[in-house]
């Protein structure tokens, strides 16, 4: 069986040494759809099914798509109030399948991405799911990163300054066209960096479809930790709000949103309600949320521009990439509005 981006025979040989007994016999695999960044596969021996994660094909930006970072974050959070899959094995040797990768538990649950999916549940259940998503973020930010062995996971001092520099550098690495206003947004962010609060573990891309929800509306796992680090927790809630603002700006036909329109579902709390619930659950001052929203929109614009660049170079796997580039401009304009 051939699966693009994943050599199953090589994986089989490596697993025999790295995780003996986890999978036995010939392997079958399939690409799990929905990812436009790291590639996620379901792999089975016919009895047990696991997940394999690897970076995208081609044009991998420096510091992005860090398999070791994802693996370490989820392994450390095992046993905390933050639900994560069990981690089985991590491989840094690019000679095995052509890129670093890791293997983890396949957790049951639905990554709700579209409002229509939530609408089928009803407003009451949608509200409960959204509230639990916010509470889980507050729980993440309450984890003592030293106690779970992540004291070397990042450099909290100067985190916001480095974020602005990092995403500016990522932009330069993917720049293939003119993007109106994006340099002005970067300059605004650099000139008005707020004082940082207490550092926490930061997820880096927190939203509903990066979590799995079971049939009882409980969050069974938070996924996609490739941009996790130690830093300012307000960056997480701001990014969550920016996804919601994007969906609301798209209007009733939010299904055209390139990320998620789940916040348009009946019962989903408003942006103000999300922020208020987070502030109450976390006990944090959210007064600088405007600047953090500006950073969130800048970050999203750069990420989507990177995906657009890979798409134009024929280095993406799966569908849904054709309109990605059209979303970058509106994100920049939203960032400029947030920082006015």
Image: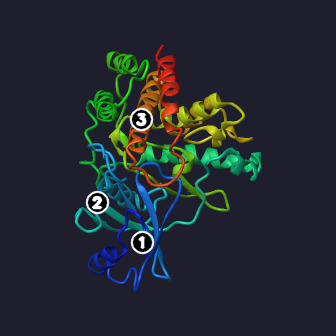
Q: Earlier in the sequence, mark 1 or mark 3?
A: 1
Residue 136 in the image: state x and y as whole percent.
Answer: 52, 48
Q: Answer whether residue 27 is visible to the viewer in this image.
A: yes
Q: Residues within 10 Å of mark 1 (few under 14, many from 20)?
A: few
First in sequence: mark 2 or mark 3?
2
Q: Are marks 2 and 1 in contact (CB under 8 Å)?
A: no
Residue at position x 69%, y 51% from top?
117
Between the residue at mark 1 and the residue at mark 3, the CA separation in whole angstroms equals: 30 Å
- Of 197 and 254, the residue lying toward us: 254
Residue 48: percent from left, percent from top: 48, 79
Picture layout, residue 336 above or below residue 222: above
Local packing at callout 3 (Cα closer than 10 Å; few below 14, some 14-19, many 20+) is many
Residue under label 2: 99
Percent position of residue 177, x then y:
38, 27
Identify which residue is drawn at 57% across, 47% down: 208
Name which residue lies at 43% across and 39% down.
308
* Residue extending furthest toward the bottom: 25
The label nearer to you, 1 versus 3, is 1
Query: Mark 1: which secondary structure?
Result: loop
Q: Which mark is residue 305?
A: 3
């Amino acid at each position: 069986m051939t699966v693009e981006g994943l050599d199953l025979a090589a994986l089989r040989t490596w697993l025999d040494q790295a995780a003996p007994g986890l999978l036995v016999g010939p392997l079958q695999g399939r690409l799990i759809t929905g990812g436009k960044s790291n590639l996620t596969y379901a792999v089975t021996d016919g009895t047990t099914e696991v997940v394999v994660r690897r970076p995208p094909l081609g044009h991998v930006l420096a510091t992005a798509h860090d398999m070791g970072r994802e693996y370490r974050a989820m392994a450390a959070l095992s046993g905390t109030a933050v639900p994560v899959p069990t981690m089985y094995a991590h491989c840094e040797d690019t000679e095995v399948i052509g890129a670093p990768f890791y293997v983890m538990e396949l957790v049951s649950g639905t990554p709700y991405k579209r409002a229509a999916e939530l609408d089928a549940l009803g407003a009451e259940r949608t509200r409960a799911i959204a509230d639990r998503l916010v509470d889980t973020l507050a729980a993440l930010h309450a984890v003592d990163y030293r106690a779970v062995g992540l004291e070397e996971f990042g450099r909290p001092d100067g985190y916001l300054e480095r974020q602005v520099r990092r995403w500016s550098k990522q932009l330069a690495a993917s720049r293939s066209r003119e993007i109106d206003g994006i340099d002005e947004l970067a300059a605004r962010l650099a000139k008005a960096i707020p004082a940082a609060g207490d550092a926490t573990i930061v997820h880096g891309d927190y939203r509903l479809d990066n979590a799995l929800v079971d049939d009882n509306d409980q969050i069974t796992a938070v996924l996609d930790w490739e941009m996790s680090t130690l830093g300012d927790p307000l960056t997480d809630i701001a990014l969550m709000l920016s996804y919601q603002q994007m969906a609301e700006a798209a209007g009733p036909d939010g299904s055209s949103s390139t990320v998620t329109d789940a916040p348009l579902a009946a019962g989903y709390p408003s942006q103000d309600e999300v922020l208020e619930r987070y502030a109450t659950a976390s006990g944090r001052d959210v007064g600088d949320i405007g600047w953090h929203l500006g950073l969130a929109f800048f970050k999203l614009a750069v990420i989507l521009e990177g995906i657009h660049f890979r798409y134009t170079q024929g280095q993406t796997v799966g569908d849904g990439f054709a309109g990605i580039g059209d979303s970058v401009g509106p994100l920049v304009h939203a960032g400029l509005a947030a920082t006015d």
